[in-house]
Image (cartoon, helix red, strand yellow):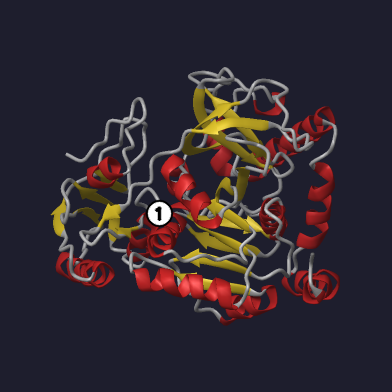
Amino acid sequence: MSDLYTRLFGRLVFPALDRANGTTIGEKLDHLRSSEHDDPMRMRGLQEEAAARVVETTAKRSAFYRKLWHGAPGPASEFPPLDRVPVVTKSDLARAGGDFPLAEYRGRVIRCVTSGSTGKPMTFLRSMEQESWFWALRFRIWGWAGYRPGDPYLTVNLNPRTAWKKKLQDVLFRCSYLTFNADNLDAERIVETLNRRRIPHLNGFSSSLFVLARYMLEHGVQAPSVTGVTATGDTLFAPYRETLESAFGLRVLDYYGAGGEGFHVASQCAESGSRYHIHPENAVLEILGEDGPATPGEPGRIVLTQLHNGAMPLVRYELGDLAVAAPTGARCTCGRTLPMLERLEGRLPDLISVPDGSYLVPHFFVVLFKGLQSVYRYQIVQRRPGEMIVRLVGHQGCRRSEVEEIVRREVAAATREQIVPVFDWVGDIPLSGAGKRRLVISDVTREKLQTAPRDGDADRAE
């Protein structure tokens, strides 16, 4: 049951924020709540029409895409407007330089620098239309866990809030935004905040929530006010889910996307089991094999096309992750008619194991190296307990001693001086067996959690 503030927020505050920001989040959220029950064939037709418009407009306005598309044809597609259109990668976009926003785009642009989960930050631009879809989709996803805009919620993150607009937004949205690392005092503070403010919704990176839940179970503490938990950012694999659901006594809903690029791709509901609902209103999702759509049941590359981003259109953009399509026509017992993913085949997000039994989550390094712009790429390797190798690729002119001192200081503070990093400056960091650069590789954590590399996952620590 929503309280008075939540009802007033929906009627007064939310519309006022939309007007002030130049967004239409509320309008799109209303549409999404309705469209999740639309006729699937009608939704497919709308997707194809939107994809055709994006391809046509992008071909006219983007020299980058025209050059790319005049090369060798891309893989086949089940969506006719995208058939044989070449796939674009992060590396392609990195070489694009100043080609975005598109020269003819005149609207306001949101600039987002990604945290570099594969060790190399990127900059993406969103139109206000795309920004509206992005937030509306997030609220729909959280809504499946019981959240309504204006309800109190707590987000666990590593990036501290500094901008006054963000802090004001947190006040209006009743968001308790807390940072978290391996220190159990932070876990204690998070649980105390949940209980003191009687917060019903908890959201955060899967690995961070796992460490929080593990602390709660070990110390016998509970958060009875929490009625919904949503996890994102890294893979919610079985040991994470089991620990979280044991600590909170409810089903955790996982969702998958690319925050920097502005995609919310797929998410779970209370009844979807291990499957995910795809969100087709804002993007076309393809799961590709060697030269075309992967067969349902077989892993394929995730390739996405944004439908509403005039500033920096992403057309057949490869995220670098794998997924498995559900059988054609598969539906969830919840009654929603959205298409389904059978499962995600994302990579195992290893944690660095600290000797006292706590963990250093991968996003600790994401935040740390986001501020070290002289580092081109990085990778953290743990072969044995109490050890940590930091592999680094520096830009020209990188002051290695300064970088090492900052990393050494931050790691010492986060691990209570139980881990002293060893630095290995290299010419490059090779791709893994699945074609990605791993951010963290920990044989220690993998063995502790009794998880094994997936087929084709060759990058054990070495």
Question: Is 206 displayed left or right of 414 in the figure?
Answer: right
Q: Give residue 443's position: percent from left, percent from top.
A: 23, 42
Pick the quarter of the image with the N terminus. bottom right
Name the residue tied to disc 1.
116
Q: Quadrant of residue 165?
A: bottom right
Question: Is 234 displayed left or right of 420 in the figure?
Answer: right
Amino acid bearing label 1: Gly
Question: Is 131 displayed left or right of 334 in the figure?
Answer: left
Residue 92 sits above or below residue 137 on the image: above
Question: Is 429 displayed left or right of 77 in the figure?
Answer: left
- The residue nearer to you, when weighing 263 against 452, is 452
Q: How many marks?
A: 1
At 27% from the left and 30% from the top, the residue drawn is 458
Q: Give residue 174's position: percent from left, percent from top.
A: 66, 75
Q: Is residue 24 visible?
A: no
Q: Give residue 12's position: percent from left, percent from top.
A: 84, 75
At 23% from the left and 62% from the top, the residue drawn is 356
Q: Quadrant of residue 177?
A: bottom right
Q: Is residue 242 visible?
A: yes
Residue 170 sits above or below residue 98 on the image: below
At 15% from the left and 48% from the top, the residue drawn is 384
Residue 314 sits above or below residue 403 on the image: above
What crowding class fits label 1: few (fewer than 14 Cα within 10 Å), some (14-19), or many (20 or more)?
many
Pick the quarter of the image with the C terminus. top left
Residue 8 sits above or below residue 431 on the image: below
Q: Give residue 385's position: percent from left, percent from top.
A: 17, 52
Secondary structure of the residue carrying tag 1 is loop
Question: Furthest-front residue in view?
Answer: 220
